[in-house]
Amino acid sequence: MRLPPLQLLPAFDAAARHLSFSKAARELHLTTSAISQQIKQLEAQLGMPLFRRLTRRVELTEAGHEFALVAAKTLGAYRSGHAAFVQKFARAQLRLSMTPLIANEFVIPRIQDFQSAHPELSLSIESSMDLVDFDQEPIDAAVRVGAGQWPGLEAWLLCECVAVALAAPSLLAAQPIRRIDDLVHHTLIRRRQEQFGWADLARLMQMPGVSGRNELLVDSDLAALNAAQRGQGVTLSFLPAGVAPSVLWPEDQLRAVMPPFKTSLKAWFVFRPNDAKADLLREVFAWICEQIAPSRDTDS
C-alpha cells in the first residue's frame, strides 16, 4: 500500500477531531470543499473510507478511528520536533525601548559591534520617551531617565546624568554666551515633555528663573538638537556624566555654552523581575554600559 502524502493529514486530523468538515475548514482557513477533496484523496490512497457521510454530520469508521491516531501522532511529533529545532537554532530576540538620545547617539551607531559579538541574539531598538507598560507591550527592557523606582519592575543603574546647554557655533559667534545671564539674548528651545528644562536649571542654580529673548517649543529631544544645530536657539540636553559633548556632536555643529550641570536624574535599564531572558538582558545591559562610559570620549 502506497504511503499517502503528508499534506493530506492536517485536513483529516482536524475533521476527525471536530467530526465536521466545516469546522475543520475554519480551523485551517480553507473551504469546506477543499477539506472534503483532501479527505477523498486520502481515502483513495488508503483504499477505504475514513468517514461515514450522514445527512447533517459525519462519523469516523473503524478504520477512521485507527488512522486518526496515526495522524495525530505524526503531526504531534512534527510540531514538537519543529519547536525543539527552533529553540536550538533560531536567534533569540530582544525588543528594547530607549530614550532617543541614548538610542541614536550611543547604541544604534555601534549596534553592529554587538551583533558581531553576539550572532545568536537579535536586537530590536525602539526610540521613545513614553513609559512602557510591560503588561501590555511586547518590550523586554527599557532605558529610561528617572529616580529608578518603578513599582513591580527591576531597574539597574546605567549612569548618572548631567545637563548641558548647546548652541551652534554661528549663533555663539554672533552673540557669545559667557555666563547664564547672556541667555537673555537668545531663543531658549523647550520640549513639550521634558524631565529637565530651563526652570529646573534655574532651581539647580538657585536662581528665580532663566530668561531668554523668546522660546521655541518642539516635540522631542532630537527636534531640539536639530533646531539648535540650525542656529535657531539654545537647547538643554542630557548626557551621561563624564561624557564630553564633543564625543557626540562635532564642535562645528554644536558647542557646550558652559560646563555641564550635575542633576539628580539617572539613566536606568528597566525590565520585569525574574524574566526568562535575564541572562540575555544582563549581556545587553553590560554592553550598553560600555557604550556610555566616559572612556568612550576618545572614540571617533
Image: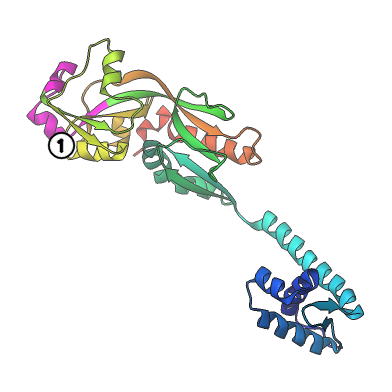
Check the image and name the residue furthest to the front. 55
Query: In the displayed structure, would residue 227 be above or below residue 173?
Result: below
**Residue beneath disc 1:** 231
Query: In the displayed structure, would residue 200 be above or below residue 228?
Result: above
Tag 1: amino acid: Gly
Q: Nearer the viewer, residue 233 or 191?
A: 191
Tell me if 114 is positioned left or right of 282 in this view.
Answer: left
Tell me if 258 is positioned left or right of 122 in this view.
Answer: left
Q: Nearer the viewer, residue 244 or 48?
A: 48
The magenta stretch spans which residues? Answer: 165-184
Tell me if 172 is positioned left or right of 59 in this view.
Answer: left
Residue 169 highlighted magenta (yes or no): yes
Structure colour scheme: rainbow
Tell me the residue at 29%/14% (across/down): 203
Q: Position of residue 205 (x, y in %)?
A: 27, 12
Residue 101 occupies which quadrant of the picture? Answer: top left
Image quadrant in which the C terminus is located: top left
Tell me the residue at 24%/11% (across/down): 207
Q: Position of residue 64 (x, y in %)?
A: 86, 78
Residue 250 in sight from this viewpoint: no
Q: Position of residue 103 (x, y in %)?
A: 41, 40
Q: Nearer the viewer, residue 23 or 225?
A: 23
Q: How many marks?
A: 1
Tell me if 147 is positioned left or right of 15 in this view.
Answer: left
Q: Position of residue 115 (x, y in %)?
A: 51, 49
Residue 170 occupies which quadrant of the picture? Answer: top left
User: Callout 1: helix, strand or loop?
Assistant: loop
Query: In the displayed structure, would residue 107 be above or below residue 54?
Result: above
Image quadrant in which the N terminus is located: bottom right
Check the image and name the residue furthest to the left. 174
